[in-house]
Amino acid sequence: MYNVCMPETLLRKKLFVPPLRPNMVPLPRLIEPLNQGPQLGYKLTLISAPAGFGKTTQAGEWVCSGPVRAGLASNGQ
């Protein structure tokens, strides 16, 4: 059961930063706290919120907003 190959599309969905939406409203007040983690030397930033609250969109905006070394992993469906 553990040796089952995962479809490539599933891996792409789970491991790549999503593109920014053209109609997205920038929320710099939410980006600033995310920037503080690396500035303080933290190596991991966890974004946690209920479904539909924009975690993936916010993470994508953060990664695209500046020099952030990031990997995005999702454990959702």
Image (cartoon, rainbow, N blue to C red):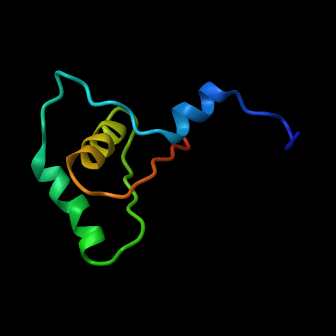
**Does residue 55 appear to the left or right of 1 in the view shown?**
left
On the rendered structure, is 67 left or right of 12? left
Which quarter of the figure is the N terminus placed in? top right
Q: Residue 31, how many percent across, how many down?
A: 19, 52
Q: How far across and down, in percent of the image, does residue 41 sit?
A: 32, 78
In terms of image quadrants, where is residue 3?
top right
User: Residue 32 is drawn in which quadrant?
Assistant: bottom left
12 left or right, relative to 19: right
Question: Residue shown at 19%/22% (left/top)?
Answer: 22
In the image, is 71 to the left or to the right of 54?
right
Q: Is residue 50 above or below residue 66?
A: above
Which is nearer the eye, 51 or 20? 20
Extreme residue in the bottom direction: 41
Figure disc tally: 0
* Residue 45, picture quadrant: bottom left
At horizontal 54% and vertical 38% (from top left) the residue drawn is: 14
Image quadrant for the C terminus? Answer: top right
As drawn, the residue found furthest toward the top would be 23
Q: Nearer the viewer, residue 15 or 34?
A: 15
Q: x%, y% of residue 49?
A: 36, 47
Q: Position of residue 33 (x, y in %)?
A: 20, 61
Q: For the point 37% across and 53% down, which residue is it?
A: 47
Of the pair 33 and 21, the residue shown nearer to us: 21
The residue located at (38%, 33%) in the rendering is 18
